[in-house]
Amino acid sequence: MRISFHGAAQTVTGSQHLIEVNDQQILLDCGLYQGKRAEARQRNQEFPFDPRSIDVLILSHAHIDHAGNIPNLVKQGFQGEIVCTYPTRDLCADMLRDSGHIQEKDAEFFNTKVRKRNQDRIEPLYTEEDAVASLNLFFPMPYHRPREVLPGVSLRFLEAGHMLGSAIVSLQIDDRESKREVQLVFSGDIGRSNLPIIRDPETVQHADVLILESTYGNRLHPSEEQLEDKLAQIIQRTAQRRGVLIIPAFAVGRTQQLVYALQRLVAANRIAPLPVFVDSPLATDVTTVFRNHPEVFDAETRAYMRDFRDDDPFGFSQLRYTRNVEESKELNDREGPFIVISASGMAEAGRILHHLRNRLDDPANTILITGWQAPHTLGRRLLDGADRVRIFGQEHRVRAEVVKLNGLSGHADSNELVNWVSAMHKKPQHTYLVHGEMDPAQHLAERLRNELELMSVNVPALHDTARL
C-alpha cells in the first residue's frame, strides 16, 4: 500500500491524498489550493496522476479546499464514483456550480483587465457547465453504514463535527500484498465538541494508519462563553461608533454559525437588535440545505428550536438574506450601525470585496475575521495589519478596525485533537499530519509522540509518498 500526499501537505488548502492498494487507486478529497494567483492556477490545473486512473473518490466534506477541484478532475477524464454523505452531495450541488461561475468570471477579469499584451489569454479552470456535469458522479451514503466501494475496500462514515455533512473516513482494506487487514482513517476536518448546530465529532475505535488534520495543532480555542462575550463586545463597540460590522465568512458552515450566534445574543438581550444582512446568494442557498437536514443537528440546537417554538435556527426578525445585485448595492449607501455577512471567507472573491472596498477607509467600521486565512489572500493581509490593500486593481487605505475572533473555527484545537486520538482503543501505528502549516503540524506531532507515545508521526511534504 502507498499513500501520496498531493495537497494540504504542510499547508491547509488543496486537500488531496492518493491511496494505491491492490492495483486500485482511491483519492481522498479533491480540493482547490488557495494562494498566489499564478501558483494556485498551476497547482489546481495539473494533477500529479492521471485522473482516468482513479477508481473512486471519497469526499470528506463540501468545503472548497476539499471538494473544489472535482469538476476539473472529471473534465480531465475521471469517471468513477464520488462517495460522500447526503448533506455533502446537496451542498456540492450549490457550491460547485458557484465555484464554476467564479472561475469563469476570474478568467474574464484577467483577460480584459489584468492581462498584458504579451500574455496569453487564460481559460477558466472549469466552467459552471463542467460543475453540473460532475454532479452526475456523486453517490451519497448514510453515516455508520459500511459499504464496499471497491473489491476488498469497505467504507464507513462517522460524524466529524466540522460542518453539515462532514465525515471521518474509515476504510477497512484487505491488503493482498501484506496479506493483512488494514484500518485506515482519514479525519477530514475534525470539529469542536459542545458547539451549536452540528453534532460533536465521533470517536474512532482504532486505526492502523491515521491521516489527521493539524490546522490548529499549536493553538487553544476560547470557550463558547468567552467567544459569545467577545462577539457581543465587538458588535457593541461598532454600534457605538455607528459603524458597519463586515464579516467575511465561508458560505458553508461559518455563515450559519454566525447567524445562529447572533440570534442567540439577540434573544438573550446581550446585543441591540441591529439589522443583519447575509449578502451571499450561495450562503442563502446553502442555508436552505441546512434547513433540509435537521437530522444532523445536535441536541442543543433541537432543544433551542423546541423551547423557542422556532423550527428555523437560521432566521430572526432582524435578519435579511439578500438575493439580487440591486439589494446588495443598496447596502453601499446605507448608514450604520448594521452587520453584513458575506462570502468569501478569505475575501478573495464574491460580494465581500465590494463591501470592503466601500468601507475599509472608515475608522467607524469593523472587519471581523472569523477563520483561518491562507497566505497571500486579502483576508490574511488584513489580519497581518496591512495599511493599504488592492481590491479590483485599486489601492485602498485600511482605517477600519480589523479584529480576529478565535474559536468560532470549525476546527478542533490542539487539546481537542490530542484528546480525539487518545480516545482510540488501539493507537495508530503510522500517523500523518496534514491540513496544517509547518509550525502547528510539528507542534501537534511532538505532543502525539510525547503525550500519547505514538512511535511513527510524520508531517509529509507535498507529493511525499509513504510505503506501508
Image (cartoon, rainbow, N blue to C red):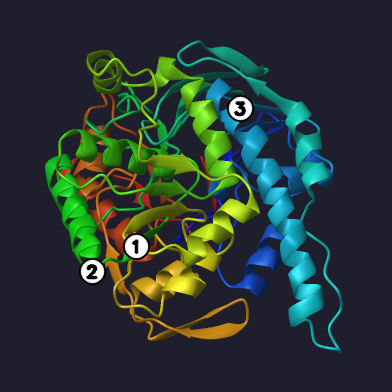
Towards the viewer: 454 or 211: 211
Q: Secondary structure at mark 1?
A: loop
| Neighbour tally class for label 2: few under 14, some 14-19, many 20 plus, Cα within 10 Å | some
- How far apart marks 3 and 2 lie (CA) works out to 41 Å
Q: Which mark is residue 52?
A: none
Percent across and percent down for residue 71 are 74, 44
Q: Amino acid at mark 3?
A: Asp
Q: Earlier in the sequence, mark 3 or mark 2?
A: 3
Q: Secondary structure at mark 2?
A: loop
Which quadrant would residue 393 be assigned to in this image? bottom right
Q: Which mark is residue 241?
A: 2
Towards the viewer: 192 or 396: 396
Contact, mark 1 vs mark 2 (Cβ under 8 Å): yes
| Left or right of 444 on screen, residue 28 | right
Which residue bears the numbered disc 3?
Answer: 90
- How far apart marks 1 and 2 lie (CA) works out to 9 Å
